[in-house]
Image (cartoon, rainbow, N blue to C red):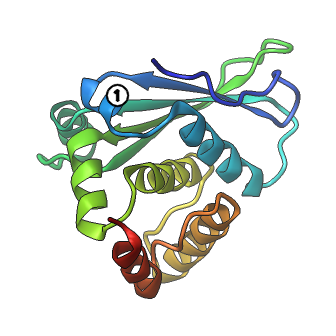
Amino acid sequence: MADPGPSSSGAPGRLDVEVMRRAELWDRSGVSDGALSLAALAAFEVAPPRSTPYEVSIVLTDDDEIRALNQTWRGKDAPTNVLSFPAGEAFGDIPGEPRPLGDVILGGETVLAEARAKGISTADHASHLVVHGMLHLLGYDHEGDEDATKMERLETEVLGRLGIADPYDDLDVAAAAEASP
């Protein structure tokens, strides 16, 4: 069953993480809720300091659901690996309660296939996608070359803190593929 993973006590500038498994294939993936929570927390820590506690949901779903979301919200009729949905403006803070940051949604079959194709662990790939999605929720994007470079640099920094190889370094990916059984 899902482990709760690390969570803050709702202290200022902290992040509460909830992982929701909505597709059975994630239960067999070797991806723990704790690893995904750590990835979200690590990404949150590289963002500018915040005085308000936040919460984020990580949703592990299948390609059918993420395809429908991708079609509805981005006009793309295809599954994808990750989508981020910011929570929007809060109507008012409740003292001591975290403010919603948004949702990071991972599409199961796509994530598993990409990890296999890259020769990396599903857990590392899913953690990378959570970091990527979190950075979007925190206001980063990769629309222009300069923004993409900045976001990739942040992703690499966060993943390095987690002991995960640089996903943008072809040499690291090749070494990981050679080392896997």
> Looking at the image, is 155 positioned above or below residue 85?
below
**Quadrant of the drawing holding the N terminus:** top left
Q: Is residue 87 visible?
A: no
Q: On the rendered structure, is 96 left or right of 70?
A: right
Q: Quadrant of residue 16?
A: top right
> In percent of the image, x 36 and y 47: which residue is there?
82
Question: Which x, y percent locates residue 122?
Answer: 37, 51
Q: Is residue 71 visible?
A: yes
Q: Type of residue at label 1?
A: Asp
**Quadrant of the drawing holding the C terminus:** bottom left
Question: Which x, y percent locates residue 149?
Answer: 54, 79
Q: On the rendered structure, is 94 left or right of 88?
A: right
Secondary structure under tag 1 reads helix
Question: Which x, y percent locates residue 68?
Answer: 18, 33
Q: On the rendered structure, is 12 left or right of 24?
A: right
> Looking at the image, is 11 positioned above or below residue 143?
above
In the rendered image, the residue lying farthest to the bottom is 171
Q: Quadrant of residue 137?
A: top right
> In percent of the image, x 60 and y 47: which residue is there?
39
> Looking at the image, is 131 positioned above or below residue 12?
below
* Residue placed most toward the observer, 58 or 30: 30
